[in-house]
Amino acid sequence: MIDNYEINIKTLALIPLDDKLSKIYEQDNSFIINKSVSEIINYSCKYFGSSYNGRTEGSKNWLGVSYKLPIIIEETQEIIFFPTSSPRYNNCSWISLKNINNYVKNQKGVTVNFKNDVTLEFDLSLCSFENQIFRALRLENILKERKTS
């Protein structure tokens, strides 16, 4: 089992298994890490020169929203993740915006197909999922505009 993990361009999703154990899905791999999803998110933000609180404050200012915020993990590669529920809850998963191929509604929530054909199911409504994608895309557009201006 791995002790630390930096989110990267190949990271698809972070799924909590319990309050101190997470499953990481990457394009070519999946594994379990002995940290909570929130610890992995915070560690990755710090690894790339910020903190989770700093990233959420930035998203809050740019988007004008204060809950279930997508965050920029790393700017130059435009690595943006969004939560499936409130990050305060232990069952909150985080999904990479860039790696989503498509998604469909299922009986329990949403099935996401990633660009490498990994398919994962998430327990949230299609409306909520699409709202999270919309916020993440707005954040991505703001980031791109600021990089070119």
Image (cartoon, grey):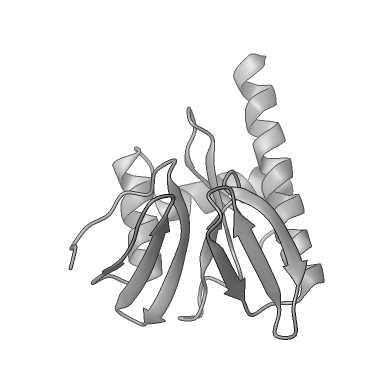
Give how far across and how far down residue 24 sits, in percent: 38, 63
State the residue lying farthest toward the right: 127
Q: Quadrant of residue 2?
A: bottom left
State the residue lying farthest toward the top: 149
Q: In this picture, is 127 found above or below 43? A: below
Q: Quadrant of the C terminus?
A: top right
Q: In this picture, is 57 found above or below 147? A: below
How many numbered callouts? 0
Q: In this picture, is 129 found above or below 72? A: below
Give how far across and how far down residue 52 sits, in percent: 43, 54
Give how far across and how far down residue 60 sits, in percent: 64, 51
Residue at (74, 78) in percent of width and height: 106
Q: Quadrant of the N terminus?
A: bottom left
Residue at (30, 77) in percent of width and height: 21
Please indicate whether residue 35 sits to the left or right of residue 70 in the image: left
Q: Is residue 25 visible to the viewer in this orientation of the structure?
A: yes
In the foreground, 1 or 45: 1
Q: Quadrant of residue 148?
A: top right
State the residue lying farthest toward the front: 117
In the foreground, 46 or 23: 23
Q: Is residue 67 visible to the viewer in this orientation of the structure?
A: no
Residue at (46, 48) in percent of width and height: 54
Give how far across and how far down residue 55 sits, in percent: 50, 48
Q: Quadrant of residue 130?
A: bottom right
